[in-house]
Image (tube, rainbow, N blue to C red):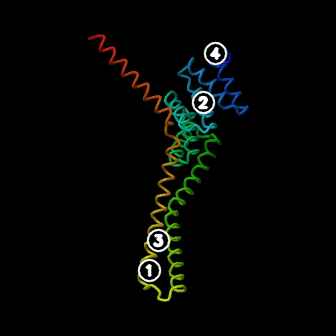
Amino acid sequence: MENADNNTKQTPEELKDLGNQAVKNQKFAEAVLHYSYAIKLDPNNYILYSNRSYAYLKMLHFYSALEDANKTIQLNPTGPKGYFRKGEVEYATKHYGDAIKSYEQALYFLPQDETVKNALIKTSAAYMADKRTTEQIPWVAAGIGIIIGVILVILDYLYTTKPTHPLLMAFVTIIISIIGYGLGKTFCYYDACQRDGLIQPPLIYVSIVEDDENDKTNKDDNSRVKLN
C-alpha cells in the first residue's frame, strides 16, 4: 500500500524511470506496476505502453505484451517502437511471418537501425527453417510409416509358416504410411494452435471481461426499469 501511495505522488516521467530501473534489475513485475501507474496519469504516452510491452514480454505474458505493442502503434503510428515491439512478441511466439511484416514496418520508419535489421534477418532465417520443418514433418512421418510397414513384412515372412500375400502387405504398408502422414499433419496443426494460444487472452481475463459486460447490462436494465 505504501508503494502504491508513493507512486500516486510521482509524475509519469518519474514512474517511467522507476520502471526502467526495475527492468535493468530484471524485476519485470515491478516494472509493469510502475508503467501501469504512469499510464493512469498519462494514458496517451506511447513510450509507456512500449516499455510495458517489453516488460510483459520478459514475463512471457505474450497477450498483454501484444496488446501494449498495438496500443503503441495506435498512439504513434508513424514511429518504429510499436512495430518493433509487436515483432518481438510475434517472434517469441513463433509467428515468424507476422514478425517479418512488423519488423519491415519498423525498418521503414527507422531504415538505418542495426537492431531492427538484425531482427529482420534473424526472423527471416527462422521463418524459412520453420517453413521447411512444417513441410517435412508429414513426409517424415509417412516415411516412418513405410519403415514400420516394411518391418511388418519382414517379421511376417520370418515368423509365420504361411506369409501373408505380398499385395496385402503392400496395402497395409501404404495404409500405415498414410496414417503417419495424417499424424504429421495433425501435429503441425496442433503446433500452430499452440502458437496462436500464446497470444490469446487468458481465460481469467475473458471471465473478467464477461463479468464486466454482464454487470453493465444489468445496470442498463435497472436504469430502464427506473426510467419506466
- The residue pinned by badge 2 equals 52
- Which one is in front in this view, the residue at disc 1 or the one at disc 2? 1
The secondary structure type at the circle numbered 3 is helix
| Mark 2 Cα-neighbour bin, 10 Å: few <14, some 14–19, many ≥20 | many
Tag 1 residue? 170
Against 1, residue 202 (above or below) is below
Disc 1 + disc 2, Cβ < 8 Å: no
Q: Earlier in the sequence, mark 4 or mark 3?
A: 4
Q: Position of residue 198 (x, y in %)?
A: 53, 43
* Residue appearing at x 29%, y 14% in the figure: 225
Instruction: Give the left or right position of residue 147, taking residue 13 as reference.
Output: left
The x and y percentages for residue 144 are 53, 70
* Residue on which disc 3 sits: 177
Cα distance, mark 1 to mark 2?
59 Å
Q: If you read the primary sequence from the N terminus, does the residue marked by circle 2 or circle 3 appear first?
A: 2
Residue 90 locus on image (x, y percent) = 54, 43
Looking at the image, tell me whether mark 1 or mark 4 is earlier in sequence order. 4
- Against 194, residue 146 (above or below) is below
The residue indicated by pointer 4 is 11
The answer to which of 24 and 62 lies nearer the viewer is: 62
Please identify, in this view, whether the residue under mark 4 or under mark 3 is nearer the observer. Answer: 3
Q: Is residue 192 above or below residue 150?
A: above
From the image, state whether disc 1 or disc 4 is nearer to you. 1
Mark 1 falls on what kind of element? Answer: helix
Callout 4 crowding tier (Cα within 10 Å): few <14, some 14–19, many ≥20:
some
Furthest-bottom residue in this view: 161
